[in-house]
Amino acid sequence: MKKKVSVIVTAAALVALIVVGSTLAFFTSQGKVDNIVTMGNVNISLTEPNYKDSGIVVPGQTIVKDPTVQNTGSNTAYIRCKIDITGLDGENEDITMTRKMQLLDGIVFGSPTDSGSAAKWVPASDGYYYYQEKLASSESAVFFSSVKIPEGWDNDLADQKFHINVTAEAIQADHFTPHETAGKIDGWNYSNGTSVPVSSPK
């Protein structure tokens, strides 16, 4: 987790030189104050306010699943999300990957109440979807709103369970410039090009 640092430094010192006759004397007075360092914070929450476990699902069914990221910290932040699908194991890796891609194709990104919000989520080569705008404190962004079970899935998947896991991350927006390709955010790097590690708050 990157943090904005606001530093206020104050110091005071008083030195007086007094000359009396041929005697040289120094009267000194020192005032001590502590440096005040105020750390900003970047925190987010990830919820699914409208998701209800429907139990058994069938091909062609649309599930309301709305992972929503809220900036609960005091600093404006950039956010990104990753989708990890597990439990769709096939006879080989190609079948497994095909099923995952079919499920991803059924995801409706963005908020259903904001027609332009889907375009704000841009997938990148590192597996993340990057939100293209800064998220101010207390603001929220809906990652996706629903998932459609592929119509072509058949009895090979009967009674099989799968998971759609979502991870959300945030980084301070102040004094940070995300990596862009063709005007789209697609990475979080230091100025030297290395990737910024993200850690959870303690």
Image (spheres, rainbow, N blue to C red):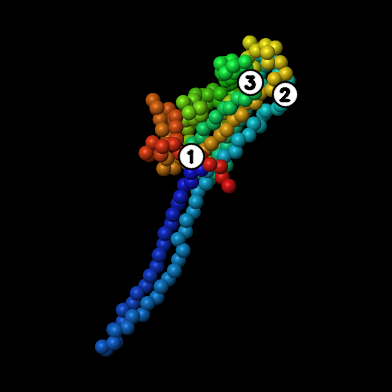
40 or 89: nearer the viewer: 89
Q: Earlier in the sequence, mark 1 or mark 3?
A: 3
- Residue ID at (57%, 18%): 93
165 or 38: nearer the viewer: 165
- Closer to the camera: disc 1 or disc 3? 3
Above or below, 146 against 21 in this view is: above
Amino acid residing under circle 3: Leu
Task: Give percent across and percent down for residue 164.
Answer: 62, 26
- Residue ID at (41%, 39%): 190
100 or 178: nearer the viewer: 100
| Res 54 label | 2
Let me know if residue 111 appears in the view: no
Q: Residues within 10 Å of mark 3 (few under 14, many from 20)?
A: some
- Residue ID at (47%, 47%): 4
Identify residue for label 1: 197
Identify residue for label 3: 88
Residue 194 shown left or right of residue 119 in the figure: left
Amino acid residing under circle 2: Ser
